[in-house]
Image (cartoon, rainbow, N blue to C red):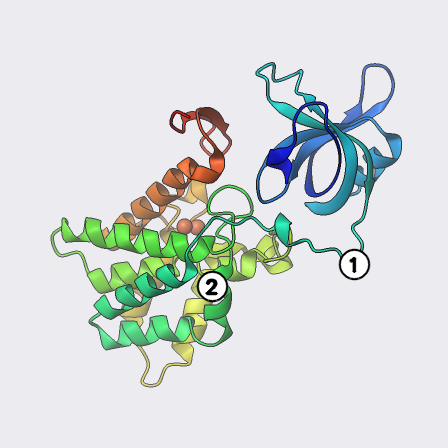
Amino acid sequence: MLTEFKAGDKIRHIVLCRVQKVGNSANGGVFARGFASDNTAALPFISFDGYTVDVLRSLTGPRAFVVTGTIDMNRFAGDGSLQLLIQKIEPPLPEEDLSHLLPDGGVDLNEYGRRFDLLLGKIKDADILRLVRQVFSGRIWASFRTNPAGMSYHHAYIGGLLEHSVDTAELAVAMGEKVKDADQDILIAGSLLHDIGKLREISQDIGFPYTGEGKLLGHIAIGAMMAEEAALGMDPPISGEKLQLIVHIIISHHGDQEKGSPINCRTKEAFIVHYADELNSVLNQFHPREGKGWQYNKMLARNIFLGGE
Ligand SMILES: [Fe+2]
Ligand SMILES: [Fe+2]
């Protein structure tokens, strides 16, 4: 496990490599740098080996490799942190167990499943409840239970999507109780469905790469399509207005056009879900997985304090 290594260790370990930059070094050689991770940590790596650099240059996304190298002090960081100097990389053998590369966020899937059911139990409108059940029917529930909610930014671990959706819904319900005439049924349905498109946008494979459909359509459009597809299968049908109020939440949950929503929030419930979603994604940056002390956070583009040792 990456967390167990110290400066000076010579290692041979299977890691997930994400390349950030490939280029020429000052002395005329080549280099590649990026991050090597397993489910315990991510370490910056650098390599000056020509063959390794060529292999890394050809990657289009994160890939698992058996790396041979040395753990070193990161001279550029100057803060005592470590980096991995890669001397050699090889593809893992087909029979190799790669499960330690899937990040584990410690989500209690059964507990979150129970909280999901409790939320459904609060929906009073029979049509809205049937719509939500229809979306989550069959194989969708099984993958919703374990899918991550992101490739790297937030809830990027097994069960992250379930955790994020339930936590967002609970926050939205709590906010809704303080807001006059907020429709709790729409809030719950909209929160549980807001990121449902991520099921088809992000794959559960090693490195959680984006799918072709995800790259072409994005989770907002896919989510709206999934809700519409589910509504088509309902008999008797759900009213157009109820469906639109829920799809509006899916479509507007990023808040504004500049943040990727084709339409900005136009209902009380859409604003509530947008802020609940944002708050939950931000607070996930303080997850115990991120470590302790001051850390630079990429999603928030600033240093944040994760608490003392
Ligand atoms: Fe989203
Ligand atoms: Fe979200």
Q: In which quarter of the image is residue 196?
A: bottom left
Q: Quadrant of residue 259?
A: top left
Q: In this view, does 87 lie to the left or right of 260?
A: right
Name which residue type carries label 2. Answer: Phe
**Comparing marks 1 and 2, which lies closer to the viewer?**
1
Reading the image, the residue beneath label 1 is 94
User: Would the CB of label 2 be found within 8 Å of ligand 2?
Assistant: no
Instruction: Give me the disc on residue 144.
Output: 2
Q: What's the residue type where badge 1 is placed?
A: Pro
Relative to 287, say whether 45 is above or below.
above
Give the class, few, some or many, for how many residues have Cα within 10 Å of label 2's Cα (few <14, many ≥20).
many
Q: Residues within 10 Å of mark 1 (few under 14, many from 20)?
A: few
SS type, badge 1: loop
Q: Distance between the residues labelled 1 and 2?
A: 27 Å
Q: Residue at x 63, y 37 (%)?
A: 2
Q: Which of 163 and 69 is in front in this view?
A: 69
